[in-house]
Each structure stands twice: as structure tokens, then as C-alpha cells.
Amino acid sequence: MRFAGEALPPLMTPALEHLGCRAFRSGLTVHLWDAPSTGVDLPGPPWKRGDLYGNGGVRGFEEGRYRACVDLHAGVCSLFDAEREEAFVWVRDPASLPDYVVAAPLRVVFHWWMNEHDGQLAHAAAVGTDRVGVLLAGAGGAGKSTAAFACLRSGLRYAGDDYVLIEPRPAPRVSCLYNSGKLETRNMAERFPELLGRVHNAEAAVRGDEKGLVFVHRLRPEAVSPGFPVAALLVPRLTGQRATRLVPCSPAAGLKALLPHSVFPLPGARAASIERLGALARSVPCYVLEIGADLPDVPAVIQDLLDRGAGCLPLR
């Protein structure tokens, strides 16, 4: 990441700081700048406003060598050259950058880049041990973050809360892309009060404008895992019951939980993304994780699944 100006690094790097290293091999290079601190505005684009899709995609620039995405709400324009593995990201105003960008910076760029390397950005959480782990997939409010933070508290390792990187072949593996976790403020206060003093966006979270954003690497750096093989795909569901249990489900049900929020919000490469996620759902056991009120049950059930082998649970 190469920055022009000093306004963007404090906003665009915390979610990625666990990936920092002194030496690295050649790969993706991202140039970032903002208008206020550099005085350099975005050049006039070769498209019209009517060419913009709802997910930020631009007609004529979703596939191929050159790709573009315009997030009008965030004021972020992302450009990508697939052949050179180089991206350019312009931010209209760092002071008004939404928390969803701070929590998952360069999401569209990573989506484009990893599609060139048979990798897939997925809307899921991931927890496990040093050797193996599980994916938790579902829409917002399904319980992914609640389960992930309950596992973090128990001693299981954390590889993501909202978006993770999946490599489905030759055997499915998940890598930690962002160390950011998000919880509703009320949920945090009731179930994870130890996090309240570490919320990045405290004012917005208290107002209810955004979920509370926590950078896990700053809270528990030793708990952030670089990644692990995927043993199972879990679909969390808050039940209101006391106990937590796992109920086997079909690969189709697992894919249904994983697909919509992983593919459709991001421009381009839909066919390849659907194929990769489908391959993942077919290659590992799928379960509904029925989350009960007793939170310590959640990591205990997942740990038991990993200890016994993901495919060894009896059908219920």
C-alpha cells in the first residue's frame, strides 16, 4: 500500500495491520490518495453516471484487464489493472469515510485481485485451532459475530468476523484478511462488556448509526490466526433456547447462507465466485449452528466438532 498524504493510513491500515511484514514477494500494489490532503482530485472518468450499478460496478469495467468501482456513498473510486496487479484508490473525504470501509478496506480490490489467483472473498467469520477451523456464514444478524467473539473469549483462534479469504482448491482453506470485528452495541454491552472500552467508533456505535468496530489484533494479537484448513461450514441461527447444538444441513443450505452477501455486493466475476463457493460447500460437511443463550456452549460445541472430526456428528 503506497499512500500520498497522511490522512488515509490511520483509516486504511488498522484492519490489515496483522499482515504487516518486513519482506514480501511481488504481488498486488495499491496506490491511495485523498482529495483534501493532497489537493489532487479524481480525473474525469470515461463513463457516465448512468453507467454505474447499485453495487458500485461500472458498465464496461466489471471484467477484463481494467476494472472500476465507484462507491458513491463512501466517496471511494477504485481502479484495477489485472495484468500489472496494480490498483489506484481515491477517497473524496477521509473525515467522512464510513466505518464499513475502515473495517474492510480495499474489499473490492482484493475481490478482483484474488479472482485472478483462484481465491475468493467471502462474507463469513472463521474460528478454529492452529490446525483446523470452521467457517460461519449467514446474513447480518444471524449470529456470526456473536459466535466468533464467544470463541475468541474461549481460547479458539480468530481468522475473521465479516469477510475472509477462501482458497477452495485443492483442499478448502481460509485466510485472515481483516482483523476487524463488529457487534451491535447492545449485544456488546450485554454479552461482551470487556470490549466496550476498545470500540474504534464509539460515538457512532452509541448513537446506533453503526455497529461497534473492534480491531482484534490490538485487543488479542496472539489470538489472530493467519488461517487454517476448513473442516466444516456452519450456518448460525439465534434460537432463544438455552443450549447450543449442531444440526446437519445440505450443501445447498450452506451455499445459500454463503452466497448472497459474498457475491452480489461486489462487482464482476460472479460466475467464477459462485463456482468457487459451490465447490467449498460441496467439499466440507455443513451444519446449522443453533446458538443458545448460554454463550460458553458455542465454542464448546465447535471445539467438540473439531476434536471429533467434522463429519463424525450423528444425524438428528
Image: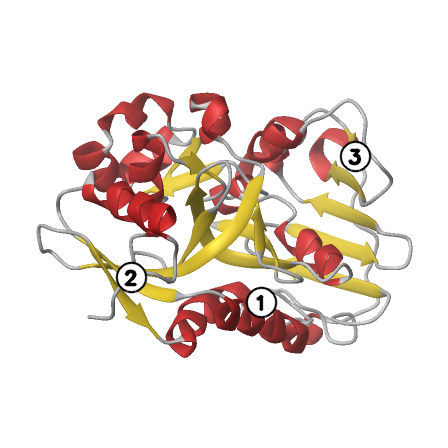
> In the drawing, does residue 45 fall left or right of residue 308?
right
Q: Residue at x 67, y 62 (%)?
A: 170
Return the residue nearer the eye: 246 or 161. 246
**What amino acid does circle 2 point to?**
Leu
Q: Residue 139: horizontal and vertical position, in percent? A: 37, 62
Cα distance between the residues tagged 3 and 1: 28 Å
Q: Is residue 21 above or below residue 33?
A: above
Q: Helix or strand or loop: what does disc 2 sit on?
A: loop
Q: Residue at x 63, y 39 (%)?
A: 93
Q: Earlier in the sequence, mark 2 or mark 3?
A: 3
Q: Residue at x 72, y 29 (%)?
A: 37
**What amino acid does circle 1 point to?**
Asn
Q: Do the residues bearing badges 3 and 1 touch, measured as CB atoms within 8 Å? A: no
Label 1: how many Cα within 10 Å (few below 14, some 14–19, many 20+): some
Q: Residue at x 57, y 29 (%)?
A: 14
Residue behind mark 2:
313
Label 3: how many Cα within 10 Å (few below 14, some 14–19, many 20+): few
- Mark drawn on residue 39: 3
Label 2: how many Cα within 10 Å (few below 14, some 14–19, many 20+): some
Quadrant containing the N terminus is top right
Residue behind mark 1:
55
> In the drawing, does residue 70 fall left or right of residue 221?
right
Colour scheme of the picture = secondary structure
Cα distance between the residues tagged 2 and 3: 60 Å
- Mark drawn on residue 81: none
> In the drawing, does residue 51 fall left or right of residue 178?
right
Q: Residue 161: horizontal and vertical position, in percent? A: 44, 45
